[in-house]
Image: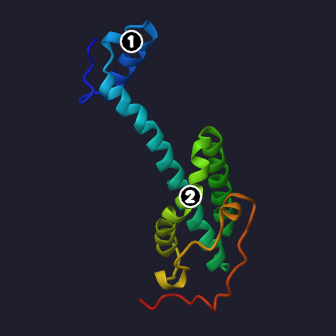
Amino acid sequence: MNADYDHDLTAWSREQAHLLRAGAFSQLDIAHLAEEIEDLGKREHRALESRLAVLLGHLLKWQFQPDYPNRKSWRATINVQRRSVGKLLNENPSLRPQVDRMIADAYPEAIDLAVAETPFDYGHFPTDCPWDQTQVLSDYWPSTTEPSVCSPSKD
Protein backbone atom coordinates (compact mmCIF):
# COMPACT_ATOMS: atom_id res chain seq x y z
CA MET A 1 0.00 0.00 0.00
CA ASN A 2 1.45 3.40 0.92
CA ALA A 3 -0.84 5.73 -0.99
CA ASP A 4 0.44 9.31 -0.94
CA TYR A 5 -1.89 11.80 0.73
CA ASP A 6 -0.61 14.69 -1.40
CA HIS A 7 -1.00 12.91 -4.74
CA ASP A 8 -4.13 10.75 -4.45
CA LEU A 9 -6.46 11.60 -1.60
CA THR A 10 -8.98 8.96 -2.65
CA ALA A 11 -6.47 6.11 -2.61
CA TRP A 12 -4.99 7.43 0.64
CA SER A 13 -8.41 7.57 2.33
CA ARG A 14 -9.26 4.01 1.24
CA GLU A 15 -5.93 2.80 2.57
CA GLN A 16 -6.44 4.58 5.89
CA ALA A 17 -9.94 3.09 6.24
CA HIS A 18 -8.52 -0.36 5.53
CA LEU A 19 -5.78 0.13 8.14
CA LEU A 20 -8.32 1.31 10.71
CA ARG A 21 -10.57 -1.69 10.11
CA ALA A 22 -7.58 -4.03 10.31
CA GLY A 23 -6.48 -2.49 13.61
CA ALA A 24 -3.11 -1.52 12.11
CA PHE A 25 -3.01 1.69 14.10
CA SER A 26 0.77 2.03 14.02
CA GLN A 27 0.64 2.30 10.22
CA LEU A 28 -1.94 5.12 10.16
CA ASP A 29 -1.07 8.58 8.88
CA ILE A 30 -2.25 10.23 12.10
CA ALA A 31 -1.41 13.85 11.20
CA HIS A 32 -3.34 13.76 7.94
CA LEU A 33 -6.18 11.72 9.44
CA ALA A 34 -6.67 14.37 12.12
CA GLU A 35 -6.63 17.09 9.46
CA GLU A 36 -9.21 15.25 7.35
CA ILE A 37 -11.50 14.67 10.32
CA GLU A 38 -11.42 18.40 11.12
CA ASP A 39 -12.13 19.19 7.48
CA LEU A 40 -15.25 17.02 7.54
CA GLY A 41 -16.88 19.43 9.96
CA LYS A 42 -15.75 22.43 7.94
CA ARG A 43 -17.24 20.92 4.77
CA GLU A 44 -20.61 20.49 6.46
CA HIS A 45 -20.45 24.09 7.67
CA ARG A 46 -19.64 25.34 4.15
CA ALA A 47 -22.39 23.19 2.63
CA LEU A 48 -24.94 24.61 5.05
CA GLU A 49 -23.84 28.20 4.45
CA SER A 50 -23.96 27.67 0.67
CA ARG A 51 -27.48 26.26 0.84
CA LEU A 52 -28.55 29.17 3.04
CA ALA A 53 -27.16 31.66 0.49
CA VAL A 54 -29.18 30.05 -2.32
CA LEU A 55 -32.28 29.91 -0.13
CA LEU A 56 -31.95 33.56 0.93
CA GLY A 57 -31.26 34.67 -2.64
CA HIS A 58 -34.44 33.02 -3.84
CA LEU A 59 -36.44 34.50 -0.94
CA LEU A 60 -35.15 37.92 -2.00
CA LYS A 61 -36.17 37.30 -5.60
CA TRP A 62 -39.56 36.04 -4.40
CA GLN A 63 -40.19 39.17 -2.36
CA PHE A 64 -38.75 41.82 -4.63
CA GLN A 65 -39.76 40.58 -8.08
CA PRO A 66 -43.34 39.37 -7.62
CA ASP A 67 -44.25 39.80 -11.29
CA TYR A 68 -41.54 37.43 -12.56
CA PRO A 69 -43.22 34.92 -14.89
CA ASN A 70 -41.55 31.75 -13.55
CA ARG A 71 -41.92 32.06 -9.78
CA LYS A 72 -42.81 28.36 -9.69
CA SER A 73 -39.12 27.49 -10.13
CA TRP A 74 -38.20 29.85 -7.29
CA ARG A 75 -40.76 28.17 -5.02
CA ALA A 76 -39.29 24.78 -5.92
CA THR A 77 -35.75 25.97 -5.20
CA ILE A 78 -36.81 27.47 -1.87
CA ASN A 79 -38.52 24.21 -0.90
CA VAL A 80 -35.54 22.08 -1.97
CA GLN A 81 -33.06 24.26 -0.10
CA ARG A 82 -35.22 24.28 3.06
CA ARG A 83 -35.40 20.49 3.03
CA SER A 84 -31.65 20.22 2.37
CA VAL A 85 -30.84 22.64 5.20
CA GLY A 86 -33.14 20.66 7.49
CA LYS A 87 -31.36 17.40 6.61
CA LEU A 88 -27.93 18.96 7.17
CA LEU A 89 -29.03 20.27 10.57
CA ASN A 90 -30.56 16.92 11.55
CA GLU A 91 -27.33 15.15 10.58
CA ASN A 92 -25.16 17.81 12.26
CA PRO A 93 -27.11 19.15 15.27
CA SER A 94 -24.02 20.94 16.58
CA LEU A 95 -24.41 23.41 13.69
CA ARG A 96 -27.88 24.48 14.85
CA PRO A 97 -26.65 27.11 17.36
CA GLN A 98 -24.61 28.70 14.55
CA VAL A 99 -27.50 29.15 12.09
CA ASP A 100 -28.22 32.80 12.97
CA ARG A 101 -24.60 33.75 12.32
CA MET A 102 -24.49 31.60 9.20
CA ILE A 103 -27.59 33.34 7.83
CA ALA A 104 -25.90 36.70 8.40
CA ASP A 105 -22.69 35.42 6.77
CA ALA A 106 -24.57 33.96 3.77
CA TYR A 107 -26.73 37.01 3.19
CA PRO A 108 -24.20 39.07 1.15
CA GLU A 109 -23.85 36.15 -1.26
CA ALA A 110 -27.65 35.93 -1.42
CA ILE A 111 -27.79 39.58 -2.47
CA ASP A 112 -25.20 38.87 -5.17
CA LEU A 113 -27.37 36.02 -6.47
CA ALA A 114 -30.50 38.17 -6.42
CA VAL A 115 -28.76 41.06 -8.22
CA ALA A 116 -27.43 38.70 -10.88
CA GLU A 117 -30.90 37.28 -11.58
CA THR A 118 -33.15 40.33 -11.31
CA PRO A 119 -33.21 43.76 -12.92
CA PHE A 120 -32.43 45.32 -9.53
CA ASP A 121 -29.20 46.76 -8.20
CA TYR A 122 -27.70 46.22 -4.74
CA GLY A 123 -29.46 49.24 -3.23
CA HIS A 124 -32.87 47.67 -3.78
CA PHE A 125 -32.30 44.92 -1.25
CA PRO A 126 -32.06 45.30 2.54
CA THR A 127 -28.52 45.60 3.85
CA ASP A 128 -29.18 43.01 6.56
CA CYS A 129 -31.21 39.85 6.24
CA PRO A 130 -34.86 40.79 6.81
CA TRP A 131 -35.86 37.35 8.09
CA ASP A 132 -35.07 35.46 11.26
CA GLN A 133 -34.04 31.82 11.43
CA THR A 134 -37.59 30.60 11.99
CA GLN A 135 -38.84 32.39 8.89
CA VAL A 136 -35.93 31.25 6.73
CA LEU A 137 -36.26 27.58 7.70
CA SER A 138 -40.05 27.27 7.95
CA ASP A 139 -42.86 27.47 5.43
CA TYR A 140 -42.74 31.27 5.60
CA TRP A 141 -43.22 33.17 2.33
CA PRO A 142 -42.28 36.87 2.35
CA SER A 143 -44.95 39.28 1.27
CA THR A 144 -44.11 40.76 -2.07
CA THR A 145 -42.90 44.30 -2.43
CA GLU A 146 -44.74 46.49 -4.87
CA PRO A 147 -42.77 46.83 -8.10
CA SER A 148 -42.92 50.61 -7.80
CA VAL A 149 -40.96 50.43 -4.54
CA CYS A 150 -38.13 48.54 -6.20
CA SER A 151 -37.68 49.84 -9.69
CA PRO A 152 -35.13 48.30 -12.05
CA SER A 153 -31.61 49.63 -12.01
CA LYS A 154 -30.76 52.26 -14.60
CA ASP A 155 -27.24 50.85 -15.20
The circle on residue 55 is: none
Q: Amino acid at mark 1?
A: Leu
Which residue is painted at 56% across and 58% down in the image? 52
Q: Which residue was labeled with disc 2?
A: 52
Q: In the figure, residue 147 lies in which quadrant? A: bottom right
**Figure check: 12 above or below 25:** below
Left or right of 24 in this view: 129: right
Which residue is painted at 32% across and 10% down in the image? 26
Q: Which residue was labeled with disc 1?
A: 19
**Figure check: 78 above or below 40:** below
Q: Amino acid at mark 2?
A: Leu
Callout 1: SS:
helix
* Residue density around tag 1, few if under 14, some if 14–19, many if 20 or more, within 10 Å: some
Q: Nearer the viewer, residue 98 or 3?
A: 98
Left or right of 5 in this view: 37: right
Please, which residue is most extreme toward the front here? 97
Which residue is painted at 59% across and 88% down in the image? 150
The percent position of residue 18, horizontal first and vertical second, equals 41, 13
Q: In the figure, residue 137 lies in which quadrant? A: bottom right
Q: Which mark is first along the chain, 2 or 1? A: 1
